Image (spheres, rainbow, N blue to C red):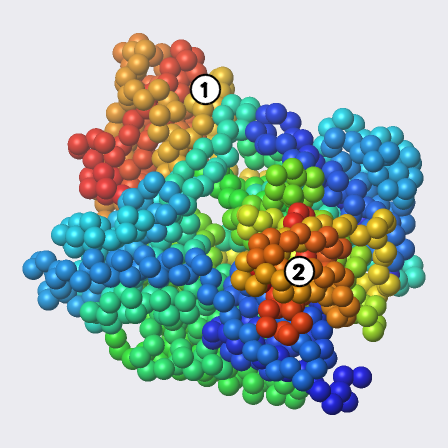
Amino acid sequence: MWKSDPHPCVLVVEGAPGVELRILDAEFQLKAEGTVSLRQSLPPGLYIVNWKTGRELQKEVVRLRAGDTRTVRQPTPAGEADQRLQVAAAAEALAEPPSAISASAHEAEIMVVVDVTDTDATSLGVRLFTRDDIAMRSNSSDVEEAQKAADSDVAIRVYHVDPAVYRLQYQTCTGETLDQSVPAIAGRRTVVFLRSVRGRVMVPEGEQVTTLDYQGADPARSVIITLPRGTPLTEASETRRRARLLLADLATHTTSLGEAFLTEIEAPDADPLVRIYAAAVILQQLEAGASPTLEQDKAPVGLGPAWRWRWTNRALKLLDLGKIEGLPADVAVATWQGRSGRLRYPGRLDALRTPPMLECCWGWAMKRSVVQPDTIPDSFSFRAATIGAAGASPWLAWRASSAKGATPDLSGPSGKLDAVLKQLAGEALSLVDSSTPTGGGSDPFADLSFGSRAIAASALSLVSDGSFARVLGQGIAQKLAQSARMPAATLHLRAEQALAEVRQATSGAGPGEALDVEVDVASAGSPAPALSRAVRVPDDPHKGRFGGQAKAGGFRLEAAFSEKENWVTVTLAVHSGSAPDGLAVEFFLHDSFSPNHLVRTFRQGRAELELHAWGGFTTGVWIPDPGVELELDLALLPAAPRIIREL
Amino acid sequence: MRTWAIIVGINEYPAATGQDALKGAVADALDFADWALHPDGGGVDPARLFLWTYPAAVPAEATPAVAAFLAAPTAWAGQTPHLVPPGRPPSVTEIVDTALLAAQDALMLRNEDGEESRCYILLAGHGVQAQVIGSQLKMQTCYLAGDFKLHPTITGLLPGDDLRDGLLVHGFTEVFLFLDCCRSSIPVYNSRVLPLAFPMGKPPDKPRWTIGWAADSDSTAWETPHDAPTRGAFTQLLVEGLRQARNPDTNSLTLEQLDHYVSNRIVAAVAPKEQFPVIHGQPHPRRLVILQTPKIPLSGPPAIVPVVINCSKVPAGTVLRMRDKNDNEVANFISNGGEVVLNAASGHLYSVESDDGVFEQSFMHAGQGETHVEI
C-alpha cells in the first residue's frame, strides 16, 4: 500500500488564517483538514482541495504523482478584490482634510460605507441616534468630498462623535427600517460596511399574493470594525476579512478559529471589535458543547473540564480591553457569560446602557436578567429589541417601529419565576405523560395560546435534556429566558399565563382567556376594506390603506397628546354631528400595539380611544355602518410632541 | 432500522399564491423516491413511503420501482387508499398529519420489538425564511405547501425545524430532512408563521437528525441546467451522492462525505449562478452514518459530456493527454493553440497534461453542460 511506497507524495495546502483547509479524494472522502498550512502524505492520484470560509467554498483539483511534493495556495476571490478597490477609492477621497467642525472636538468617529454596486439606492435612510434618541448629523463636507472622488458604487456618511454607543438606523432590503447598536470607541474610527441589495417581499393583496421589490441593506451581511483614527481605509482589508469570518461563525454556530488566526486576533493592536467577536465565538461554541477551534473537533480525552476552562480563559482575555470609553455592552455581557461557565458566583452584571451588538450576547443578557432584573432597563431601544428583533444573526437588530405601542412591564420581583417555571415544566410533563402513554391521542395542549405553547414547549425541552433534575433554582429560568429572548419580568408574566392555561387543560375546563389577544372587542360590522389592501410602507402598515383622509362622510378623526416621562398619551377621537349613540367605530393601530384593533362606540357625537405610544404612526378608522374610512398620520401633526414626530 | 419516507414535489402552485412554476420539483421527488425504495438506498418498504407530486407523476416517465409504487400508492392522512392524489398539491395539515401518524407507528413498533426508526423527508418546491410564532429570534426555512396564503393570516407554510423536532418527539429515532427550496425572506411586516399543530411531548435526550437546505440563508435554490432546467440542482446532486458516494473500504456514507459531494459539485451545476447548500446534523456529521450499503449502479450508461479545453497557452503541436483518477489515459490530442473538444463521462476527476509535465491542469468534470478547462 501507499505507506510503504518508496516514492510518497506530499500535498501542501496553504490558506489565510480563519480558512478551513480540506483535502478530499476522488470519492469526496476527507483525507486531511487544518488551517493555514496543511501538509499530508498521500498516494498518487487526483485530489480535491477545499478552502472553506463561512458560506463560501473555493476548490482546486490536483494530481499527485509518485515522489511529488506540491503546494497549492488559496486563490484570491474576485469579490474581495473588488471590495478592496472600492475601499481604496474611498480612502483616497478621504485623504481630504476634514472640516473644521469635526475631528478635534470629538474623540471618535463612525463611518458608514454603503456598497451600492447591485442597486440604485444611495443612502439607505441611514441615521444615527444617541442613547437619548437624539439624531446625530453627519459631517456633510466630508461626505460630499468623499462621494465626489470615490467610486460611485460606494456611498459614505461620516459622524464625528463622542465615545459612546449609538443606535444606527437604516432601511433594509425587505422594506423595513432596522436599528442596531454601533459603538464609537475613544481614539478609533468605527466603520460600518453595509451592502445594499434588492429584496423581494410577498404581501397579501386581498386574496392574492403580490410581490414588492425593495432596495436596502441586508443586515445579516453587515460588517463592523474599528481602526485607529487617522488610519486609511486601505489598511482595513485584513481586519474586515477577520471580522467577516467571525461574524459568519456567530451566525452559523461554527468556528473558523485556529492557533494562527487566534494569534493574530490576540495581538495587542488588534481591533477590539474583532476580539469581541472571537470571544463570542469561543463562548458560543463552548455553550453548545462544541469545539471552539477548527483544529480539534472535540475535547481531548480526559481533559474535558480543564480544556473548557482554558478556552474560557482565552475568551476572557480577549475581552479584557481595559477601561476604554465607548465599548459596547457585549464586553460586559460576554465576560459575565464566560465567568458563569467557570465560577459558581460570576459576579454582578451592571445594568446595560444600550442593547448589545450581537444576538448571542442578547441571549446571555436575558439569562442574566432572571436573577438581576435591572440588567435590562426600560427604555425605547430595549423594549424594541425585546419585541421586534428581526432575525438578522449575528447582529441584534430590531424593527425601529416595534416599540411604538409597547407597554412597560419590566419591573417586579422575579423571585417566584423559578418556582413558576418548575411547576410549569412539571405539570406540562404530567399532562403529556397522562395523555400519550404509547403515542397517539389528541393534543392535550390544543387549547393553549401560541405564546403559552411556546413557553410550555421550551420548559418541556429543558426537562428532556436532563437539566430539570440538575438545574434547580435559577438555572431553568435562565435557560428559558435565553432561548425565548425575553427579560425575566416578561417571561414571568408569560409563564404564569402558560401555567394557568396548562392547569385549565389539565382540569379539562377548555380554553380560557388568553392575555395575548389580538382584538379587544369583536367587530360587529363588515370587515374593513383596508385590510385587503397591500401594506406599502412596512414601518407604518396602515399608511395609505384607509383612504388617506382624516375627514370623510361627515366624520372627523383627531388626536390630542399629553407627554409623560417615558410615553406620550394619545387620545384619538372621531367626531360627528349626526352619529347616533352606540354606533361602532373600529380603530386600527400600529401592529406593535397589542391589541391593535379596537372598537369603541359613539356617545354624544364622539368616539374616543386613549393609548400610550412612543413614536408616531398612522391610525386607520373604519366605521362599518356608513362604510366610512379615515386615516391620520400622527407624525405629521404639527402639535405632536417630538417623540411622535421624529421616532 | 425501520425506515419511512415522506416525499413532496410541487412544480405548480395555485395562482393566488403568486409563485412561479418550477420545472424540477416533481422529477426531484420521483428520483428521491426511487432511491428511497432501493434496498441499497433508503430501503423503505412501499407501505411506508408517502409520495405526493403536483402535477401528478406520470408512471411512464418514472423508474420501474416508482411506477410500480404509483400503481398502488400509499394513502396520505385523510386520503382514500390506493387512489391517485387529488388534482392539487398537499396542504400543511396533510403533510404534518401523515408524518405524525408515521411517527406514532414507528413508536408503537419500537415499543414492541425495540427496533429503531428513521424518517427520510424531501420537500421540493418553493420556500421562504420566516419567524415562527413562539420563536423570538430564530428564522426557520418554511416550505410552501399547496394551501399557502398570506391573508387574513399566514397559512400553508411548513417550518422545517419544527417538523424535524416534532417527529423526533413523537416516535422517530432519526429524522433526515432535505428541503430543496429557496430561503428568501418573507417578513410579511410583523406577522409570523403559525407553528405546526404537533401535539406537545418530551423530546428525546440525544436526538439524531440531519437537515439539508439547498441554499444558505436568504438565498435562492436554483434549477439546472440554467438555460433549460429540469431538476433542482441540490436534490439531483443529493440523490447522486446517496447512490454513489461511499467509503470504498467500508461501503459507508457519512453525512460529512455527502456534504462534501454536494458542496463541491454544485458550483458547476448552477453556473453562472451561485448556491451554497447547508447540510448539518447531530451528532457531528463525521460520526453520523447515513448508509452502509454498496453503491447503487447508474440506471443507464454514464452521461458523456463535452470537455472544452483551451490550449491557447500551449504551443501548437504539443501532445496532450487526458487521464482519469487512476492515471489511465482516456483521450489524447494535439494542441492547435485554440480550443479542443473531447467527450468524457461526467461526474469524475480528470487531468490534461503534456508528456514533459510542463503543461497540466486537473479539473472536476461535473456540470450539467460542458466543462471548460484552461491549461
Q: Chain of mark 1?
A: A
Q: Quadrant of the N terminus of chain B?
A: bottom right
The percent coordinates of residue A542 (x first, y second) are 38, 30
Q: Chain of mark 2?
A: B
Residue at 37 percent of width and 33 percent of height: A537
| In-front residue for pair B309/B187 | B309
**Vertically, is A83 above or below A46?**
above
Q: Nearer the viewer, mark 1 or mark 2?
A: 2
Q: Is residue A218 left or right of residue A7?
A: left
Label 1 is placed on what type of residue?
Pro
> Disc number at residue A239?
none
The percent coordinates of residue B130 (x first, y second) are 54, 45
Mark 1 Cα within 10 Å, few/some/many (few <14, many 20+)? some
Residue bearing the label numbered 2: B334
Q: Is residue A583 visible?
A: no
Label 2 is placed on what type of residue?
Ile
| In-front residue for pair A610/A343 | A343
Q: Is residue A148 visible?
A: yes
Q: Is residue A99 left or right of residue B327?
A: left
**Vertically, is A512 above or below A623?**
below
Q: Secondary structure at mark 1?
A: helix
Residue at 41 percent of width and 61 percent of height: A80
Mark 2 Cα within 10 Å, few/some/many (few <14, many 20+)? some
